[in-house]
Image (spheres, helix red, strand yellow):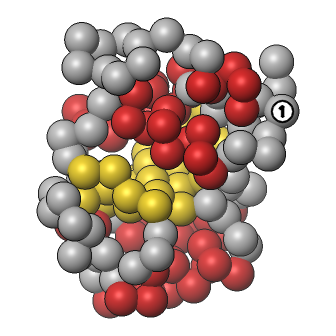
Amino acid sequence: MKALGKALVIEANGLVAMDTGEALVEAGFSTAVIADNAEQALNCIQAEPIDFVLLNTELVTDLTEILLAAIRTRSIPLVFSTSLPDGQDIPATWQSAAFVTKPYTACDLRGVLAQMFSGHAFFGEISAMPPRSAGCRA
């Protein structure tokens, strides 16, 4: 089984960040790094290779533009997590980016990952994973 690499979860709520990181590892990432603000996230991206980013839109600040530029320059796949079902709080230059709406499940994350990494050898294993929660759609 080939892992998808290292994921970066940018989320201020520690429990949500831990659950999300665990779900990403279960979905095939080798590890999930957690940052609770844009500055920590930028330091992570500059210090080590990151293969995927999940960014909570509630943490979007002035520094986020620098973070988003670093993500774009490195061509890191990005998903926003948002409390708004239509994604209105996603920065204007990223309106076409994928997003999950809070509260999201591990199944919701797997669905987004399956779309984003459809060309990856691990894709079949992600989409074949059984639902882990009662609210998960198969």
**Residue under the image location 47 percent in, 69 percent down:** 97
Is 98 drawn above or below residue 92 in the view shown?
above
Numbered-mark total: 1
Residue under pointer 1? 121
In the image shown, does 49 or 74 lie closer to the viewer? 74
Question: Does residue 63 show up?
Answer: no
Q: Residue at x 16, y 62 (%)?
A: 84
Which quarter of the rendered picture does the N terminus lie within?
top right
**Within the image, what quadrant is residue 108 found in?**
top left
Task: Say left or right for 55 vs 118.
Answer: left
Quick one: label 1, few (<14), some, or many (20+) residues within 10 Å? few
Residue situated in front as seen by the camera: 106 or 135: 135
Tag 1's secondary structure? loop
Residue 135 appears in the picture as rendered: yes
Residue 125, placed above or below residue 30: above
**Is residue 29 rendered to the left or right of residue 58?**
right
Q: x and y percent of residue 92 in the render?
A: 36, 88
The image position of residue 34, as x and y in percent, is 44, 45
Above or below for 125 versus 10:
above
- Relative to the observer, which residue lies in front, 29 or 35? 29
Give residue 79's position: percent from left, percent from top: 46, 58
In which quarter of the view is residue 2 placed? top right
User: Who's the residue at 44% across and 89% down the image?
Assistant: 93
Q: Position of residue 62 (x, y in %)?
A: 32, 89
Relative to 82, say whether 94 is above or below. below
Amino acid at the residue labelled 1: Ala
Which quadrant holds the C terminus?
Answer: top left
* Residue farthest front in this picture: 138
